[in-house]
Amino acid sequence: MKQGLQLLDYVVFFIYFIAVSSYGFWIYKKKSSKETSSTDYFLAEGSLTFWAIGASLIASNISAEHFIGMSGSGFAIGLAIASYEWMAAATLVVVAVFFVPIYLKNKIYTMPQFLRQRYNPVVATTMAVFWLLLYVFVNLTSILYLGALALEVTAGIDFTWAIAALAVFAIIITVGGMKVIGYTDVVQVVVLIAGGLVTTYLAMDLVAKQFGNPNIFSAFGTLKAQAEPHFHMILKKDNPYYKDLPGLSVIIGAMWINNLNYFGCNQYIIQRTLGASLPTARKGLLFAAGLKLIIPIIVVIPGIAAYVLFQNGMFQTEMLDVNGVVKPDHAYPVLLDLLPSGLKGMAFAALTAAIVASLAGKANSISTIFTLDIYREYIKPDASEKHLIRVGRYAIWTSMGIAALIAPQLRVLEQAYQFIQEYSSFITPGVFAIFFLGFFWKRTTGNAALVAALLTIPLSTAFKFWYEEIPFLNRMGIIFLILVAVIIVLTLLDPKSKNNPKGLEIDRSMFKVSTGFMITSILIFGILGALYTVFW
């Protein structure tokens, strides 16, 4: 087995890099002939098609943790980890029907702006500062760290050089604004899916050869027969991974809170729809939902295939760490290293596309919140449009530079991704409670929302250390219900809440959907139902 990239792989990767950069520059020059406003720069107002919105959302969402982490989970847990992707497809439909119309009707451009308009400046600024700190010091830094680590493991690239290269590549894409990000993400998604399918094909071809199957399609049956427990979607309490995926909570419990917050109340994700018309935004989210259904094929199935091959005698050394312990996260890099020259370069480009698209999307969100919710509100309210765009670019460079400096420090963490996900999600119950009641209960007051925001982390910490036996998702659901109760009680105790003027403009007609949307949604839910029925 030849480890690392060969000359042909570098040629393939170089073609990908030139294609994405050139296309981004062409989009930038094409759109820069006319005066650009700040909302056009940050949101690509009216410029993104539905397929660009959907592709950009997926490209920003999928990163190194999917290729490396979810493949590793496929090796260890099995297809149940695909619930994160398949439930996300259902969540995107709900967001398209109920969340996006509220944002667009009330001309919301950022999540802090929503909080300012719905509650008050204190809630908005508090959350804006918190989001900036979280996005820069946790999310952007972790994407850069995990991305560089993935490139180091799969291609043998020096970790420091990998960080620098990913940061520069992402800046090239990001400084052109959301239009450039949106349309280059289409190319990134094509590369991401094509490269991922190449690795899946290799994995299934190895299974076919190992077990004497005539083709890769018949190898799927062998995969299920050889690893039958790995195809259970609902884990029982005696499963060692039950705390990660606690049974029915995955499909009817707190997974909904986690996903609705991530896809519906997260600047990083929802920003792509805020500059579009309602029909275009909804179509984009449906397109993203459709892509979500196929993501497990390119990230989970290879992990399960690696498990079957390992159990049958292959990769006995490659799957071990320095202490001789089996490391599930080695599954994807091991498979990637088996690809022939050229195809390995394509798969490497897919991994890089996922990382760079996520970095660009996160950096743009950081720039948008800082410029529109901090700089324009408190530092220079009379700033011109050109000045705001320039400040936005400075914010991109600064945040990426900070992340590049901090990322190497994450090496001290034994399991960086799990640690970051566990503790950054401590705010999820509070944020979603504030948004959910802010959407649908006009009486909710700013003081009640602020108390919930301040209680989220202490409550999450207390439950984490006092009730360790409670699965992560269940704990999130319990805290969400507690915070909703707190908000309701504090609001009812406030006599001013009866005449709260901060309600948003909402009417039932906003939530009506077209026949095409309804048919597509039914199809998505039908596919999800069939998948869970087959693998129950």
Image (tube, rainbow, N blue to C red):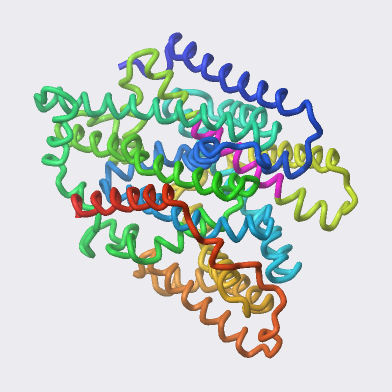
Residue 116 in sight from this viewpoint: yes
Magenta region's main secondary structure? Answer: helix
| Quadrant, the N terminus | top left
Q: Closest to the observer: 405 or 341?
A: 341
Q: Residue at x 18, y 36 (%)?
A: 308
Q: Residue at x 77, y 48 (%)?
A: 371
Q: Quadrant of residue 439?
A: bottom right
Q: Is residue 115 above or below residue 219?
A: below
- Toward the left, the furthest residue is 212
The residues colored magenta run 353-368
Q: Residue at x 76, y 28 (%)?
A: 32
Q: Is residue 381 left or right of residue 64?
A: right
Q: Is residue 297 left or right of residue 369?
A: left
User: Is 359 in the magenta?
Assistant: yes
Q: How many marks?
A: 0
Q: Closest to the observer: 237 or 324?
A: 237
Q: Closest to the observer: 210 or 119?
A: 119
Residue 457 in sight from this viewpoint: no
Q: Residue at x 38, y 47 (%)?
A: 520
Q: Is residue 406 left or right of residue 212?
A: right
| Residue 259 percent location from the top left of the image | 45, 57
| Quadrant, the C terminus | bottom left
